[in-house]
Amino acid sequence: MAGSRPGGRRGAPPESSTTQVPTPTPDPGDGGRFVFRTRVLSAADLRRAHTRIAHEIVERNHGPAGLVLVGLHTRGPAIAARIAAAIASFEDVEVPVGSLDVAFYRDDIGRRPVAPAGPTEIPVDVTDRVVVIVDDVLQTGRTARAALDALTELGRPRAVQLAVLVDRGHRELPIRADYVGKNLPTGYAEDVRVRLTDTDGVEDGIELWGPAGDDYADADADDGPGPVGDPPGGDAGDGNGGPR
Amino acid sequence: MNHLLSIDDLDRAALDELHALAESFLEVTGREIPKVPALRGKVVVSLFYEDSTRTRLSFETAAKRLSADVMTFAVGSSSVKKGESLRDTIQTIAAMGIDAVVVRHPSAGAAHQLARWVDASVVNAGDGRHEHPTQALLDTLTIRRHRGPAIDGLRVAIVGDVRNSRVARSDVKALALLGAEVTLVAPDTLLPPSLAGWPCTATHDLESVLGDVDVLMLLRIQRERAAEASFPSLREFTARWGLTVDRAARLAPGTLVMHPGPMNRGVEIAPEVADGPRSLIAEQVHNGVAIRMAVLWKLLSGGSGGGMVA
Amino acid sequence: MTGPTGAPSLHPVASGVLIRGGRVVDATGPRVADVLVEGGRIAAVGGDLAAGMPSGVTVLDASGCVVAPGLVDLHTHLREPGDEEAETIHTGARAAARGGYTAVIAMPNTDPPLDDAAVVAAVLARGADAACEVVAGGCITRGREGRELAPLGELHDLGVRVFTDDGACLSDAGVMRRAMEYARSLPGAVIAQHAEDPALCGHGSMHEGAWSARLGVPGRPAEAEAVIVDRDLRLAALTGTPLHVLHVSTAQAVESIREAKAAGLAVTAEATPHHFTLTDAACAGFDPVFKVHPPLRTAADRDAVRAGLADGTLDAIATDHAPHRTEEKERPFEEAPPGMLGLETALALTLTELVEPGLLTLEQALGALSWRPAAIAGLSDRHGGPIAPGGVANLCVFDPAATWEVDPTKLASRARNTPFAGRKLTGRVRHTVLAGRPTVVDGRCADGG
């Protein structure tokens, strides 16, 4: 199934960039218009971010009881599973993990091709539970809005919270995340790409890509790994930015 | 805007995508509130020139579960009976502002003609003896849900009135697209006058395929065919081409039995077989709503470039 | 009904027409010559006739053109009386004139049908001032129902020579035999059959074969034509009455007629431009404009029809011009009426599809379009040439090299159901002269259309 939502669209990028490309070669899906800039978080940074978010969730909710983590396709379910694993490592409790597809609830149906990216499977009734929606990148807030509608159809949670690996700004709706792996101020034309072993088949990491041909882009980047293509590990992964 | 007029409109990737979409909608239809707001504000018209409550309800249910508005055009009580042309009818309806029209018509090609006259998406819900693409999509989805997504090499027999069956024409194409091996089983009076270009084989002998197929699809036999000298009597048809209890017992283990409905119990299929453990007939109906949701969603959800086939 | 020249008396005769600079082609062969027409007849044929012409003579430029006897269509549906919304005698005749025709046989399947002397007389009266000579065909049976004979003698007295129930096949062999036997008492009469066994055709809407099977459209098998042709050939042998097979469409029928002719039988046959041009694949898009009876057949059948025209087995090219109201052709394929326009494209299709590829010589083609059908219909006294002094001036002047694209909206016919819309054709009528009077000048009807 052609399930991935088109990512990296200049001008109106969805929050989740799902183009599946080996880094850092130019993405065939965007016609080479984007070039790799820098690695923002390494695999180790990501692991630390998961762990920190796991602690914050448990701390804020006074323990893991009554929690359910619901990942938004395509990368949310994998991130939710990692957070659940982290919770299990220190609380010895299996927090239920589900997946949610919001395609049918989006507000841009008919404006561009929209396709569901995976099944909606939540192993427990969400009613009266605290649902933590998990996604990779928060940008406009429109996906989160759709997720709230989708959740409402499934039951009446006691509370809904939002966890994302990256908050890159550019909000278009009054929505904010409760848990953030990294706040990453970006240009509107830039693209944040999350890579996960589970969904992308490459080493975990978060990369910043930018439009090809901009004056601050390195011309060599078009040909493959550019001068910034092999950043020293961890230089961008300061892991700051907690719940706001 | 694109249409679903024939299985010919689909390539393998498009068929796979519709099946994947249908899986998503099966999840939706299993919910307590089996409805999504996906097609809010869209208007779907059902235009049925033949009575087919089942298919019409299936499409209308699908549209409603997608939150589309549904208009039912009752041909029987309309100006069509007063001789209004197909073109005038559809253009009048289209002028009300519609996004899709689901059409059933006794003449082959009616949906193709409508598609030339309106901007709305046209979904063929059965045109004469030509095609019934959503039935084939749900039939193949049902088979794939039982036999895994890869069904290439699966042996499927389609038994009965193939000549007059739009379902068979669509099923043969969809099954061939998925790599299944199709055998038609009927006397020559019920087979197409030519099988040139059909990706299947044919035999007169149901007995010879019984132990040798993975899926047996039965077709509805129209009672009036006997009067047209297509076969001597329903009794003789049942004796030679009906899936009797006795024949069902000789099917290979695990052989699935399907029927697009409505069934003539005791004619093409024995009631015990229709209700038996091999039968997927109820599941076909269930999957029909999800497939039709998938088709409507695919046709109506896309922006530019969101058509049936890229 | 006809004047002293044999041409319709209501046509005012032009004071004189000079057709200048063309190449004359008729049954006697080609030659470069001017043709002078006076008093409705050909006055002179020869080298430069322009010198010393009186001033009142209309000069029609025929440079680069063929000057041929006017074309004769054995098979035209004019729809009047009964369906004047589709075509009238006058609009149909104008379409004929634009196509180079000076005579058409009006098929009798009107409403009411031409099975009655009064209706035939009315049609002839309506056609008297039309843009071509309107020759009435007559029904074989009352109401074309295939049971009782129509008043063949009364119709014959009105000049009817071609009898047919066309649109319907006269399928009852006994009635067919009686009609042929009775027709022996009517000099010049020919029994023309729409050869399609209705029992084999059922509700078929297209040729039965790979395409019909794929499209799920009930078919009309080739054998439906062949069995009737074979039967009628035996009845022709039995009765000795001339048989004309309308719109032959199958290889099997061509072969049967070929054998019958070799055996000396009095049989003639026609083929339509659509049957020698199109195949059943044209129905793939379910456009009813391609629905016709007998149906478009396979490529092998089309090629056999071409071969039959080439070797003379098929005598005539006839249009089966069958106008239908647009809304009728916008019904679903299986419900739409059969038939397609032909008068304005027949000559060009013959030139493009048969002459240009070398299947027929120009003389053969014009024979099939003009003098052979004229002979079959008993019109040789005034149609079909030869172009010589004293002959009635029914002439067709066409540019065999002119190319054009068929545009349904620009046809003279009232209907639009041509299956050749958008097709580029070679050969275009420039002038048509009916009994000395130009009906088409420079491709436009003389009355302004």
Image (cartoon, rainbow, N blue to C red):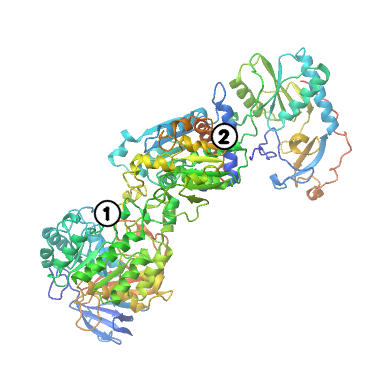
Residue at the (15%, 76%) spot, across then down: C5
Quarter holding residue B48:
top left
Q: Which residue is mark 1?
A: C86
- Which secondary structure lies at badge 1? loop
Residue C273 seen in this snapshot: yes
Q: Regarding mark 2 in the picture, which secondary structure is present there?
A: helix
Query: Quadrant of the rendered structure where residue A44 is?
Result: top right
Q: Which residue is mark 2?
A: B22
Q: What's the mark number on residue C298?
A: none
Q: Who's the residue at 49% across and 40% down the image?
A: B217
Q: Taking A140 as reference, is C256 left or right?
A: left
Q: Position of residue C102 (x, y in %)?
A: 24, 70
Q: Is residue C62 visible?
A: no
| C-alpha gap between disc 2 and disc 1 | 49 Å
Along the line of sight, the residue nearer the viewer: C337 or C236: C236
| Furthest residue in direction top, as rendered | A62
